[in-house]
Amino acid sequence: MRRLVSPRLIACCFAVAAIGAAAVSTASAPATAARAAEARTVEFNNGRWFDGEGFRAGTWYSVDGVLTRQRPARIDRVVDLAGGYATPPLAEAHNHNLQNAWGVRNFRGRYIDGGVQYAAMLCGDGADRDKARAALGADAPLDVLYASACISSSDGHPLAMARRNPDGSLRPVAEVHDHDYLVMDSVEDIERKWPRVRAARPDLIKAILVHSERPERRNDTRYFGMNGLRAELLAPLVQRAHRDGLRVAAHVESAADFRIAVEAGVDAIAHLPGYQIWDGRSEADYRLDDADIALAARRKIPLIATAGAAQLVAGKDVAKLERVRALQRDNLRRLLAAGVPLAVGSDRFDATVRAEIDYLAALELMPPARLWRAAVQDTPALLFPQRRIGRIAKGFEANFLVLADDPLSAPAALDRIRMKVRRGALY
Ligand SMILES: [Zn+2]
């Protein structure tokens, strides 16, 4: 039987045992659904528009939901941006809040009100995905990708999390295996289980590595349900996925996991290693090797940092968080210098990508415009590479937010969204 959906499932993101039964706040009331584009041509004047470096004054037009600078012969509607800052909308590259219908009902409003128009839910199954899509509605101003094939080992993450019922009891392992996530323990399992992958019709695949360089964890009951794929499975799994035209995002914990993922040719790294330092491990286990960083850069493998998840793991332990932040700074500085593409995702059940933008801004590792490009330009392009989104440019979808203040001065400008536009229509 399928279980009742609960916050337990929503938190199946980072492989940490200590989250506990955190209260999930209720989202604000669902925003008004996007109105159908009632006007074919819209003039947006008196705005300041993000051009990748800064904001430039000007007028843009939406013609059938597509941006142009060329004034159409007929204008159906004129919208005055009153000097506001127009930027492509936000994208959340790693989350779980909208992974099932319960999550959509509770968190949909938070995303839409917060100006998030694109998102990826990185672990789930096909049945939940179908219900989540239905709950979201076809005309929601929010496009969601689902990693409805989420692959790990029989003793792997997210088993421990998925087993926990809200009342503290545990679901049987057999109920979780090949339902909440797909189990692969051997290279042979890849072909054997592939029909299940296909049946889930994933938008992308999530593959989980958790300290794959430490096989001794498998015999340690403390780690049961918190491990991941054996390292040797990843490359053949990625090759199999690519033959089907499917992309693979890898959950990684350690520097060794990062190397294995990069060498396997994954399409995205879903975490910056070291958002938590496991018991008995130290910074050395999470400090990325320069050669691995260089290979990731050459292969243009994007990194979804989810760095702010460290705050949830550390809780009130300030010293612990400071240690992790120093490690993250060291890794991120070298990743950015090498040119590894940065994508933005929070992996937080209590927030959206906004929390990650704030966290990364506070690390002060890059100029504000560089972070903003990662958030509004590079992350949408990673999620939907086939679409023309993430830029205010001719031929791109007329999707943008208008902020009262300049977000390059402070991301807190996201607190004051004046206007949200989707394919030329206000919502
Ligand atoms: Zn996650």
Image (spheres, rainbow, N blue to C red):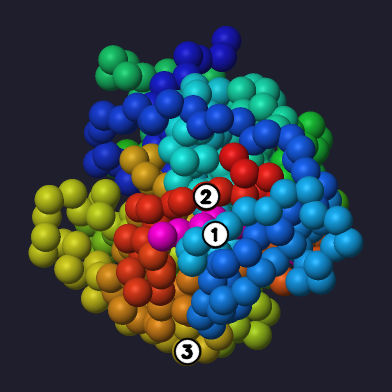
Q: Position of residue 21 (x, y in %)?
A: 26, 29
Q: Position of residue 422 (x, y in %)?
A: 66, 48
Q: Which residue is mark 2?
A: 419
Q: Is residue 237 visible?
A: no
Image coordinates of residue 382 in percent, x first then y, are: 66, 63
Sequence order check, earlier mark of 3 and 1 = 1
Furthest-top residue in this view: 1
Is 397 contained in the magenta span?
Answer: yes
Farthest residue toward the right? 73
Q: Are marks 1 and 2 in contact (CB under 8 Å)?
A: yes
Task: Tell me the SS state at disc 3.
Answer: helix
Magenta highlight range: 396-404
Q: Which residue type carries mark 2?
A: Met
As measured in the structure, the alpha-carbon distance from the residue carrying label 1 to the one carrying label 2 is 8 Å
The CA distance from mark 3 to mark 1 is: 37 Å
Q: Amino acid at mark 1?
A: Leu
Name which residue type carries label 3. Answer: Ala
Compared with residue 377, is residue 102 higher up or lower down, i.e. above or below? Answer: above
Residue 278 image offset from top left, x and y in percent: 27, 57
Disc 1 packing (10 Å; few <14; some 14–19; many ≥20): many
Residue annotated with mark 1:
81
Residue 55's place in the image compared with 280, above or below, is below
**Residue at (33%, 46%) from the top-left corner?**
16
Residue at 11%, 55% in the rendered image:
317
**Location of mark 3 (residue):** 337
How many marks can you see?
A: 3
Secondary structure category for the residue under label 1: loop
